[in-house]
Amino acid sequence: MKNYRYEYISVYQDIIKELINFNQSLGFKYEVAQKQLKKFDRFIYSKNISEIDLNKQLVNEFASKSPHEAQSSQNIRVSCIRSLAKFLISKGYEAYVYPPLPRGAYTITFIPYIFTNQELQKFFTVADENVEINKKRGKAYSLIFRLLYGTGMRVSEVLSLMLEDIDFDQNLILVKNGKHNRERLIPVHPELMKNFKEYLVESNRFYTSNTFCFSHDQKPFSTDSVYSAFRNYLWKARIPHGGKSKGPRVHDFRYPNFNNIQTFP
């Protein structure tokens, strides 16, 4: 199944699609890499390059770290351009393979943001108030953030959910193709499942099992749209954001405050 998240327009577009197809045929979702490949594609297109020649100068320019860029961002980009170069070589092209980053570059230094109960209450109050402003998307985002908080799921896992993955009788959600392509069952609070079912009925998705639970024009919501709503709700709830790589992040809902646990907001 061809699953391209983006349109590719440079001279590398066919080889990029081949690389995506190859990795997906091995069982990888290959979603993060596709975003980096899009950046590379636009980078090549902006230079009016008309032939495939992944030389050292191009690779170094694309992979170099910006002054205020997080190390993790460069790590992802380097991994992507190395994979592309190796794939080109396997296809008979000449390509420069960017060297691996030095030991320690992949060390995770980010400290998760732990929301207080008061912050959680303010955040979800804002999310609910936004339902009146944007009835369709607002209700979806309110539910998405509660699923993230109440289940510990990742954003990509929530956005990939279909009706067939939900067991409303047992209050269980089946996560398919999670991290490392593993499946897992997640028990869910009955009140949250009740809200989930009401949303699906109201949005006419309860009787179409092969449709994404959170979608627009039959395509799942993008992670970017969820991140955008998250930052908007933080601002309205007066929860400060420290900037890129500082947090809070959407996935920080997965880190509960065990010193001050409350019931589901």
Image (cartoon, rainbow, N blue to C red):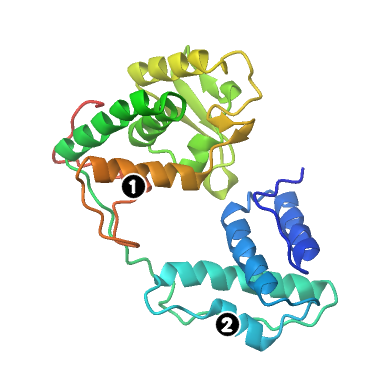
Q: Residue at x 49, y 35 (%)?
A: 158
Residue 98 appears in view: no
Q: Amino acid at mark 1?
A: Arg
Q: Which mark is residue 75?
A: none
Query: In the rendered image, which quarter is residue 115 located in?
Result: top left
Residue 264 appears in view: yes
Q: Is residue 14 above or below residue 118?
A: below
- What whole-number distance in Å separates the C-alpha atoms at marks 1 and 2? 31 Å
Q: Is residue 106 above or below residue 154?
A: below
Q: Secondary structure at mark 1?
A: helix
Q: Which residue is denoted by mark 2 in the rendering?
A: 61
* Residue 76 image point, x, y percent: 52, 66
* Residue 25 image point, x, y percent: 75, 50
Q: Which mark is residue 231?
A: 1
Left or right of 180, for residue 199 = left
Q: Residues within 10 Å of mark 2 (few under 14, many from 20)?
A: few
* Residue 105 image point, x, y percent: 42, 76
Q: Is residue 32 above or below residue 197?
A: below
Q: Secondary structure at mark 2?
A: helix
